[in-house]
Image (cartoon, rainbow, N blue to C red):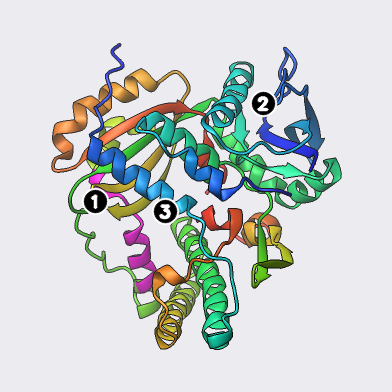
Amino acid sequence: MSTPSRATAREVLDTTDSSLLDLVDNLLNRGVVISGEVMLGLAGVDLVYLRVSALLCSADRVIGERR
Amino acid sequence: MSERRPPIEVREIESLRAELERQAATPQRWNADAEDVQRSVARLVLTLVEFLRQLLERQAIRRMERDTLTAEETEDIGLALMRLEETVRDLAGRFGLSADDLNLDLGPLGRLL
Amino acid sequence: MSGVYLYALLGATPEAGPGVGVCEEPLRIVEIGGLLALVGDVPEALPPSTATLTAQDAVLRRLAIGVDAVLPARFGTLLADDAALAEALVPRRGELAQALAQVAGCEQMTLRVWGEQAAPLAEATGTAHGPGARYLASRRRARQVPEVEALRHGLGALIRAERAERHDRPPLLATVQHLVPRGQSARYLAEVEAAAPRLHPWRVTVTGPWLPYAFSEAA
């Protein structure tokens, strides 16, 4: 899974239109996230890719609440 | 019916933009600093733990609000979170790390909270 | 890297067909574990820009005309293929189905709360007994937005659900998202205007209606 480049994300914030800022906030910070990923690098080299979709489920939603 | 909206002030736009920029900012990638490997490792570990702590806190509060925790569970979880917060703060302090330092690039996870 | 781009989860198949996506690609609907995923096959994920963000929002607004429940995905959600999409969605289908049910027939109004100083924290109500329970209660209070209580009172049942986040970066103190029934934005704005004097010393500004971006979890 790929994610939008952070550097280009900053360009979209170059506005004084509050509606546009909220558009950016809604699309980049909200919405359903179905898989998280963390890239661990060392000395600028990407080495380990972690997919952490399990982190995004609360246990009670997966297993069901007991009461 | 009128659709009049309260006007937003310039100062307000600026602080909103600053907040969104903070959320979009590209934090440093993790790099084990040869001079201080211990501090670099501590920074990575504490960042991940702090992220998890916030996730756990949020979920615990939701369960508490939905009344799906017993009084004992609430007390136990509360104590555990309290100690976790103290521990992260203590360890961060020992390595000279501020709250801002615990902000490595977590990709989309970083904007989960 | 080409792949399957997820736009949203839908509560029903649009009668008029799904239309096209941001890359002019024909959209399709994939049924996964009881959920309907709206996807497009794209050569690569587009980077965020005013144009691409607006375009993605427009695709979903158009669809929402004919579909009661639309749960937008975060911008940039690209997967390798339908199998990867299924793998990601299936474990969360219960939770996502609940979120979809909650947003059916609703849209989102976004409030920004402005002021020089946050409202003082509410007093502990004394029902928490031990230090752990008190800690959890105080963490909960720290996340609340009491500044707009007068507005909540005025909006009443118009608020189907709320998501709040404190920033405490004066003048930006907090953001509150309200899930309201579709078509009620004029009433919502009228109430915001009416409540303004009661919110002093705090102010609010409103944008919306939006699709329910902030309600991706049923909370």
- Identify which residue, C103 or C108, lies in the foreground: C108
Q: Position of residue C27 (x, y in %)?
A: 76, 24
- Identify which residue, C201 or C81, lies in the foreground: C81
Mark 3 and mark 2 residues within 8 Å of each other at the beta carbon = no
Q: Residue at x 65, y 67 (%)?
A: A44
- Residue receiving disc 2: C22
- Mark 1 packing: few (<14 Cα in 10 Å), some, or many (20+)? some
State left or right for residue C192 relative to residue A57.
Answer: left
- Residue receiving disc 3: B22
The amino acid on which the numbered mark 2 sits, given as a three-letter code, is Val
Is C144 colored magenta in this rendering? yes
The amino acid on which the numbered mark 3 sits, given as a three-letter code, is Arg
Q: Which residue is drawn at 69% across and 61% down?
A: A52
Q: Which residue is drawn at 26% across and 28% down?
A: C192
| Location of residue B42 with respect to A37 vertically, above or below | below
The numbered mark at residue C170 is 1
- Mark 3 packing: few (<14 Cα in 10 Å), some, or many (20+)? few
